[in-house]
Image (spheres, rainbow, N blue to C red):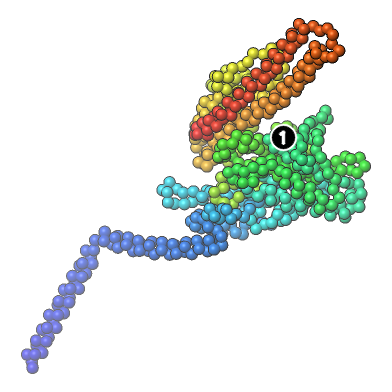
Amino acid sequence: MMRSSVVRSGQRSSASSVSSKINNKDKMNDKKVDPTVVRIQRMEQARAERRLNASTNRQLRAQKEKRNIAKGNPGDIDFQLLIDEYRNARSNTGQPHYLDPLTICIAVRKRPISEKERGNKDHDSVSVFNPKVTAHMCKTRVDGLSKYLDNGEFQFDHTFNDMDTTEDIYLSTCRNLIPFVMEGGRATVFAYGQTGSGKTYTMVGIQQLSIIDMFELLERSPYYSSSLEVCVSFYEIYGGKCQDLLNSRERLVVREDGRKEVHIVGLKEVSAQSSHQVQLLIDKGNRNRTTHSTEANSVSSRSHAICQIILRNRNTNVVHGKLSLIDLAGSERGSETKSSDPQRRLEGAEINKSLLALKECIRSIDSGDPHVPYRASKLTLVLKDSFTRPETRTVMIATVSPGASHADHTINTLRYANRVKQIKVMEFEAASVSEHEEIVSDVVPEDNKGKRNNSVSPDHQAPSSSISMPEFTESNDEFNGYWHEHTSTEDFDEDTLVHGMKNIELSVNCNSGMSSREREMRIQEAKDRKVKRIFESLYKEENALTALHMKTVKEVARLLEEEGKLILSVNGQDVVDYDIDSYAERMSQIVNRKISLYSYLKFRLEAYKTRMENEEVRVGRILQSI
């Protein structure tokens, strides 16, 4: 028994010693753990956490994407999340619309996403918090994976989002113009923006609401209703030409008299007794407006439509007040116009020219400059009294498309409206480049100006060497002079233009204070101006060619009449004696004259056709120069 207990105690002591050795060994092992193993364990733990977070984010993104698709808002979910984050941080910054009477009022309207844009999986990239609007440029970093937003923020007098109606815009911007016009003022409302951004839709609503309020004021005021008459005129400016939309598109002539008052000869004014009659006239004018299909819009407005509601004194027929409602043609950059139709390109050049002139006129009014450059385009010329009279008010409503694919056009529209009134939230150095700089100082370097002047063709042509100038008699000098009078004397050498563009790129890139987006904008602006000048030059030659054709036809008609009299002088019934030598001499002169006229017309026609053939190549070289 005693031996058994001794054995057990020996076993217990042996077990305890073994356990002690094991614990000591574990402690020694703990002290010898490699730091690399610890780091690897931590990396594995961090990797597991990242995978868990990535899985959670994928699930959240999938759920968000399903909700967006169900709401009809497809598109890149990453960019949408970034935009939502931006909006949530500024959700309480919007302000109410104040109805302060302003001489120049600039408003921006964002239209809703269209079904076509949803079908293309385009998402909303414009945020509006009155009076600010932000266009989000969705970009990817150089790694090709990280996505970020390049936000362009602008501030205006009023900004409206896609939930605001046309009536909301009218009440905040245009309603106070009606009593102003009733008191004898001149008010002008413009709708400006990229084609397809909702300009015409907005302007049609403004027209309807304006005439309703005007007739309501007339009915409430016996003095106004008895002394004033409401007249309506509606015309368009298409390609530098005026056409009456209420009179079978009759061609109109714009003239300035000795008192420097502008008159539109042949414009039809229709008296109206009710708002319903005015609305019928406006609908008729809108139906007759010139539209064409472009890359951006199948029914793009290619003309400036000017609807004028005039209050005339019944006794003196003098204009008491005038409200001009103008739906401007859709703007688009010439460098992004894919159409090869020269007519569409000429339209775009004329549209851009008039929009630049309009901006300068509005800026002159806002700054109090006594000189208003209203002669810079046909549009500003016909609106002279709206710019030069002391009692004037102007409202510009810039419409923008919300789609991310239109972000660059939206930025251009906002920059245009921003410069009109010089309201600045972001500093763009590109804005300091004037759109009205001469092409010589803007494109050609100083040391090349003399070379360029020596290469200018005096006949303003770009024909091939196979076209030769015909010889003319002294009697044809008037036709040659007529051509030079109706065309510019400068021509454009594309090599010089391309060289100038490269110099602009070099000077812009050397400016370290500019961001990449600002550099791109400045270079693009310079390219647009050069392309515009080429199209303007071609457009002037087109007008000169048609005018020369008409003058030639009239001269030939006069010669035909003289030929008839000459034949009667020889073969008339009562003719007994005649001088055949005089007849032959005069007939030879008439034939030579007609040959000379048609030869000159053919020469100009061939030169113009050659310019048309070379135009795409010339423009392409400039656009691809950078």
Residue 417: give x, y in percent of width and height.
65, 44
The extreme bottom residue here reads 1
Residue 421 appears in the picture as rendered: no
Q: Nearer the viewer, residue 621 or 162?
A: 621
Identify the image quadrant of residue 1: bottom left
Q: Nearer the viewer, residue 52 or 18?
A: 52
Residue 518: give x, y in percent of width and height.
54, 40
Residue 475: give x, y in percent of width and height.
72, 13
Identify the image quadrant of residue 302: top right
Secondary structure at badge 1 equals: strand
In the image, what residue type sits under mark 1? Lys
Query: In the image, what residue occupies the spot 58% across and 55% down?
Result: 115
Q: Is residue 72 above or below residue 151?
A: below
Q: Nearer the viewer, residue 479 or 10?
A: 479
Residue 205: give x, y in percent of width and height.
73, 52
Q: Is residue 470 above or below residue 371?
A: above
Image position of 318 (left or right of 394): right
Q: Is residue 520 above or below residue 175?
A: above
Q: Nearer the viewer, residue 198 or 236?
A: 236
Query: In the image, what residue occupies the spot 77% across and 40% down?
Result: 248
Query: In the image, what residue occupies the spot 80% across and 13% down?
Result: 571
Image position of 325 (left or right of 111): right
Query: In the image, what residue occupies the spot 10% across and 90% down?
Result: 5
Few, some or many C-alpha atoms within 10 Å of disc 1 (few <14, some 14-19, many ≥20)?
Answer: some
The residue wearing badge 1 is 241
Q: Is residue 372 above or below residue 310?
A: above
